[in-house]
Image (spheres, rainbow, N blue to C red):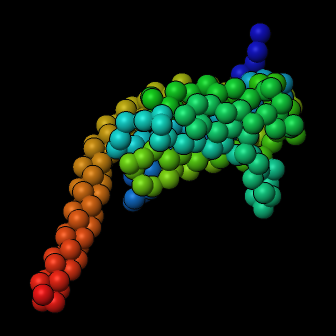
Amino acid sequence: MHRHAWVPRPAFGLTGLGLFFSLVPPGRSMEVTVPTTLNVLNGSDARLACTFNSCYTVNHKHFSLNWTYQECGNCSEEMFLQFRMKIINLKLERFRDRVEFSGNPSKYDVSVTLRNVQPEDEGLYSCYILNPPDRHRGHGRIQLRVLMEEPPERDSTVAVVVGASVGGFLAVVILVLMVVKCVRRKKEQKLSTDDLKTEEEGKMDGEGHAEDGAK
């Protein structure tokens, strides 16, 4: 039986507000949700969760995904999994057959699972997402830490109850913000396309008048 990754339970209050501001749409980029830090027990399986919000449904012919690994913040990134019309597992030497795609792009989930985590797997894991016609690429980064022993259990019943209440409220607010943002983004892209068409039509009219004058 596999042991699963251990994630510390967050305390709410200011943490809840921090979560809210981290999930509120930050402008024009695609919204990607990942755990900032993931603590995993040595020898267990770790699910590197990466989900995203987009104003458009996923078309597998145009959708693209890259997963990369960095040993440290200043180290070069090594790509270990891609999506180009299908999942492509690059099977890096460090991971071999331990990486498994466990998401579903059609449901805006591009998570991967790392089997039998080892201490040398510690580092930064990034998911890069592009979902045309959305022009903005999304990026999420996870700091993976490997624990040699399981931490002691703590009673967090109150935190869980409060967290569930705050989380439900934030989910509704974020959904409303996403709908508003998607409407605005589609209008902006339509206006941009219309302006380009108008400019091209103006050039064609100008060329037509020039030819009439020459005659």
Image location of residue 13, percent across then percent down: 47, 44
Image location of residue 176, percent across then percent down: 27, 43
Q: Tell me which residue sits at (48%, 34%) in the image.
A: 60
- Residue 40 appears in which quarter of the rendering? top right
Image location of residue 129, percent across then percent down: 53, 45
Query: Which is nearer the eye, 154 or 169?
Result: 169
Residue pushed farthest top? Answer: 1
| 32 over 96 or under it: above or below | below
Q: Tell me which residue sits at (83%, 30%) in the image.
A: 96
| 27 over 7 or under it: above or below | below
- Residue 88 appears in which quarter of the rendering? top right
The answer to whether any part of residue 163 appears in the image is no
Image location of residue 38, percent across then percent down: 68, 38
| 57 over 69 or under it: above or below | above
Report the quarter where the C terminus lies. bottom left
Instruction: Tell me if 193 is positioned left or right of 170 in this view.
Output: left
